[in-house]
Image (cartoon, rainbow, N blue to C red):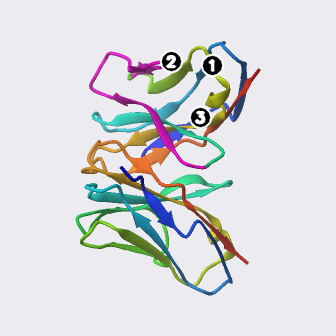
Amino acid sequence: AQTVTQSQPEMSVQEAETVTLSCTYDTSESNYYLFWYKQPPSRQMILVIRQEAYKQQNATENRFSVNFQKAAKSFSLKISDSQLGDTAMYFCAFMNNAGNMLTFGGGTRLMVKP
Amino acid sequence: KAGVTQTPRYLIKTRGQQVTLSCSPISGHRSVSWYQQTPGQGLQFLFEYFSETQRNKGNFPGRFSGRQFSNSRSEMNVSTLELGDSALYLCASSLEGLYSEAFFGQGTRLTVV
């Protein structure tokens, strides 16, 4: 079974600054996908970024980028130029090899301060 | 394009009762999965359906069941409700399920009293 660990329950950052959220995972599978989801107070989970394990290049999506270290089983999210709208819970998630189940970390509550 | 729709948004039930939650996926999506979110256990996978077949099931008791209809709409049922079933139940749909992006609904908040 896979496990996903987010070691930072809460973080805060000043508007316009950069913040990095940590995530580690454990799996015996060689092919898988990793995701970061954002859950604002509205509760709707929104996909922020995804990474295919077979790709060495780190995924980037506008102000969001990841640092994927496959050997270390680490998948951190960097948010640049933080905005007030980035305030939310962030979940790291692992997609199994069969592609039909997400395993989530415990989440990191991020607050962006003006 | 309409998003994933979950009904009802809020529900209050009494211990011992049963409840049915509904999820209408994005048009054209054939995979629907369900997750339970609680403060103590976080987000946990319940089950996933694709073309009316359950492809995967999480580690939940048999009181939790689901089904998917030919139009891809899905329902989940919880029988003999317990206080610990109080949670936010999230539904996600995706085009094919396999590695395709999952779009989540806003969830159904179930409170068991």
Mark 3 or mark 2: which comes first in sequence?
3
Residue A63 marker: 2
The x, y position of residue A108, in whole percent, is: 64, 35
Write down the residue under mark 1: A82
Residue B3 lies, with reference to residue B52, above or below; the image says above
Q: Chain of mark 3?
A: A
The x, y position of residue B27, in whole percent, is: 30, 56
The three-letter amino acid code for the residue at tag 1 is Ser
Label 3 neighbourhood size at 10 Å, few (<14), some (14-19), many (20+)? many
Q: Which residues are magenta?
A: A43-69
Mark 1 or mark 2: which comes first in sequence?
2
Among the 4 quarters of the image, the one containing residue B100: top left
Q: Is residue B56 magenta?
A: no
Q: Chain of mark 1?
A: A
Q: Chain of mark 2?
A: A
Q: CA distance from mark 3 to mark 1?
A: 20 Å
A88 with respect to A24 (left or right): right
Residue drawn at x 60%, y 14% is A81
Furthest-right residue in this view = A114
Please state, as top left, top right, bottom left or bottom right, where the C terminus of chain B lies in the image.
bottom right
Q: Is residue A55 magenta?
A: yes
Write down the residue under mark 3: A6
Residue drawn at x 29%, y 42% is B99
The x, y position of residue A10, in whole percent, is: 71, 32
